[in-house]
Image (cartoon, helix red, strand yellow):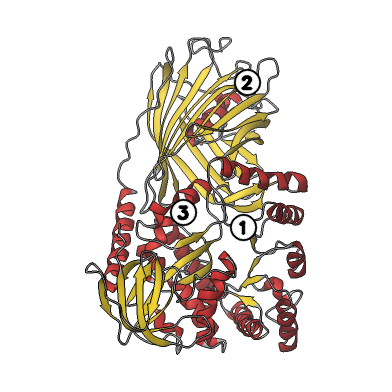
Amino acid sequence: MLTLQEIALVGATLHPMTGEGPRVAHLLVEGETLRIVEELPELPETTRVIEGAGLHVLPGLVDAAAAHHPEHDALYTAAGVTTVRSTGAELALGLAARRPEARDAVPGPRLWWGGPMMAAQTAPPGPQWPIISGNPEGAASQVEGLVAELARAGEELDGLVCDETLAADSWGAVLGAAEAVGLPLWGPVPPGGTFGDAVTAGQRGILGLGPVAGENRLDEVSPEQLGEAARAAAGTPGVAIVPLLGIVHRALTNHPANAPELSLLTLELADAWEADRARYAAQVTGDLRSRLEAIHRSQLELVRLLLEEGAEVLPGSGAPAPWLLPGRSLIEEMTRWQEAGIPASRVLRAATRDANRALWGQDSLAGTLQNGAPADLVVVQKDPTEDVAHLRDPEAVVVRGRWLGREDLRARLQALQDAQAAALAAQTAPLEVDLPPLPEGATALLTGHGETRSGVRRLASEAWVVARLAEGGRLYAARIIEPATAAMGGRETVLLQVVRGGQLEKLDLRILEGTSGRVMSMRGEVIEGTGSFQVERRLDSTFISNDPIDQPVVGLDLSPALTTLILAHHCPAGANPLLLLEGATAEPRARTYDVEVGDDGLLRIRTAGGGILCGLDEVGAPMAHTRLSAGGRTDYRVLGVDPKVEGGVPPVPARIIRLEQPAQGTPDGDPGEQDGETAEDGGEGGR
């Protein structure tokens, strides 16, 4: 980690972004702030003096729309991006990433953080925060609950973010709730909403130019219509527009196979980029290419007109969407503005002073070179006000007072590349996972281990146990290890759940975050006399909530192996309620899993979020678990099985995978009256 040191950059050309022109002066970095002097004072002996003659200095750049990830800090810094407005991050990841020690590790850009994206209830888990649709009051209470929960943990948001899946009624409720708690909302305008709706409701930032164009199609719009749209948008002060030109432009660009930038990305991102490269090459031809080219031309003209009319327009990259490399893609976005006829000096002002004022307030000194302004700088060899392309390959970048020269920047990129190569190699290396601990008196019946992959990327490895409890009932336990990446410390999950009579009786869950060291724990049990289930959640030792589940559930869907075992042993054909952990704070919710048993013994499960294909072999080991959702496809494969009793824990014959002949057994493939629990392993009756 770099330590702070007083720096004197002597005789450089400063571009203050205050409305004044460039001038030659001496720039002093004192801690994390700036002081500018015409005459160099006597300096402490410890001051690092750097000759600035011939160098150009401007404030650090702001990316107004990027899905920040800590792994990309070196990429942002190397491009001179010292602030990122995050478009959404999984809650635990975002909380860990914004801490000062995490920001100073590379160092990485300052974060404007809006937490997870407010999204539709059916959105895939992760950076989204599923919001109830059709219930505005419920949507508003979810936002208020998130803010209150963070406040209890001593955390806060800079604003809120949404995505395009949010239903119109929920969007309106979220906007109202955001205003009530004093947080600005940024994001796209959902289908059914208009630019005018967003302005009226108080949305602070709008992503994309579609809402600005209104009913006009950008591939067919006339110059007169673009002018009218620009004047209308410029007449609504206080609303920032982030065009995201790169989203269309990337599809019009010829991306080489095995491009060098892929070595800087995770395996998951590199795979997605390669898939999109092939898709662009195959599909973006003929009429589609002509249409995208027309859209891009209209976008360029609309950005020029918006700025000409006085609208607040900010450059944002959309990184790390395929072929939008964090950091560099902001520079490319800015060059496209310049191609539209916008002067380089105006582009630079939008990416520095204007963007910082939009994020931190009109009184902020950030994004300028003034006394007391934050010490975030980009130092280049050629005048960027002549061509913003001169920002490529900076001579140095200063992040919160820490000087990173060209060699420092390159070393950090090399370290990132090495870390990604090591992570790729680790995908094929065995990952040993210890079996989860069992409570006293539990007898293991079947153990095993396996891994879950998305394409070639290993998401997790797990070791699992099926056990008999002395007091009756069946225990399903798993330890899941999600491997560390180039920037994250991985995650360990230990899950124990007791099923008796086809109902989840007890639940014990512990999730250790490798980066932050924080522990999310959950304990659940049936409320006596009601049949409903109660879950207590804690973060470290701090109580978060008691969550009542107003119906019996069969199990928790978290481990592919355990979910397959529970579905096969305890869920009859038809609708079955299971628990899911939803949203960025892992709220437990009962969801319906519709089970169908095929002639091949495989279970085909339909859920609101997608589908599952899974099944057991003759000893009861989960041999298949493929899941399809909006987030893509994942596959579990078993790597080893160890029956602890003769014959293992087989399901009813109809639920044993038989790929060559129809399964035999009960006509509907139900697990049977004993719910899959035999007298020998603690069930209520013999098979």
Query: Measured from the top left, where is residue 208 in percent x and y?
Result: 63, 70
The tag on residue 526 is: 2
- Rendering coords of residue 91 (x, y %): 53, 48
Which secondary structure, mark 2?
Answer: strand
Residue 410, placed above or below residue 235: above
Q: CA distance from mark 1 to mark 3?
A: 16 Å
Nearer to the camera, 582 or 171? 171
Three-letter code for the amino acid on which mark 3 is drawn: Arg
Q: Quadrant of the C terminus?
A: top right
Quarter location, residue 138: top right
Nearer-the-camera pick, 365 or 245: 365
Label 1, on which residue? 161
Q: Earlier in the sequence, mark 2 or mark 1?
A: 1
Q: Nearer the viewer, mark 1 or mark 3?
A: 3
Q: Viewer-proximal residue, 190 or 598?
A: 190
Q: Amino acid at mark 2?
A: Val
Task: Please identify, in this view, whether the residue under mark 2 or under mark 3 is nearer the observer.
Answer: 3
Q: State yes or no: discs 2 and 3 in contact (Cβ < 8 Å).
A: no
Callout 2 crowding tier (Cα within 10 Å): few <14, some 14–19, many ≥20? many
Residue 223: percent from the left, percent from the top?
Answer: 71, 88
Amino acid, disc 1: Val
Q: Does residue 558 appear to the left or right of 295 in the view shown?
A: left
Which of the two discs, 2 and 3, labels the residue nearer the N terminus?
3
